[in-house]
Image: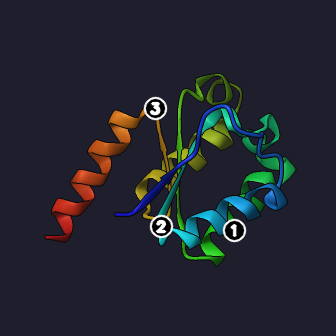
């Protein structure tokens, strides 16, 4: 699967408008997935009531791109049972995944590839 891996030190993603350039870059390179380090996401993303996560994810879905958020989000998960539920549900799907590190994401991608045959 062709993937765009974002640098951890890039600009913070605070809204759906901030991901437009990222999506454009991914589409230019024929990517199917964009990997965003968790530290690039504004704290508002992890506070579901702000709607930021929904807006950002919807942009990726609209452009038929998968999104993987990689990194330690445990401090956010401790604060919100709704976020824990959201992450769990997302990880059961195919479009948005949360992974603690790149090794875990690689293992998930390999597992998904094997299941497709």
Quadrant (top left, top right, bottom left, bottom right) of the N terminus: bottom left
Front-lying residue, 20 or 112? 20
Q: Residue at x 77, y 46 (%)?
A: 13
N-terminal of the two: label 3 or label 1? Answer: 1
- Alpha carbon separation for disc pair 3 and 1: 22 Å
Question: Does residue 14 lie above or below 61 as drawn?
Answer: above
Quadrant (top left, top right, bottom left, bottom right) of the C terminus: bottom left
Q: Is residue 22 left or right of residue 72?
A: right
Front-lying residue, 86 or 35? 35
Q: Residue at x 60, y 29 (%)?
A: 73
Percent position (x, y) of residue 39?
66, 31
Location of residue 22 by image quarter: bottom right
Question: Does residue 107 lie above or below 92 as drawn?
Answer: above
Badge 1: how crowded within 10 Å, few (<14), some, or many (20+)? some
Q: Is residue 97 left or right of residue 102?
A: right
- Alpha carbon separation for disc pair 2 and 3: 22 Å
Front-lying residue, 42 or 48? 42
Percent position (x, y) of residue 69?
55, 44
Q: Which residue is mark 1?
A: 58
Secondary structure category for the residue under label 2? loop
- Alpha carbon separation for disc pair 2 and 1: 17 Å
Q: Which residue is mark 3?
A: 100
């Amino acid at each position: 699967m062709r993937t765009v891996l974002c640098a951890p030190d890039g600009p913070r993603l605070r809204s759906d408008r901030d991901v437009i350039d990222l999506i454009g870059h991914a589409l230019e390179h024929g990517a199917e997935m964009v990997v965003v380090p968790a530290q690039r996401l504004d704290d508002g993303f992890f506070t579901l009531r702000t709607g930021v996560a929904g807006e950002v994810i919807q942009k990726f879905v609209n452009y038929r791109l998968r999104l993987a958020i990689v990194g330690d989000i445990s401090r956010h998960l401790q604060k919100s049972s709704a976020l824990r539920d959201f992450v769990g549900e997302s990880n059961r799907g195919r479009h948005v995944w949360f992974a603690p590190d790149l090794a875990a994401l690689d293992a998930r991608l390999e597992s998904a590839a094997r299941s497709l045959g």
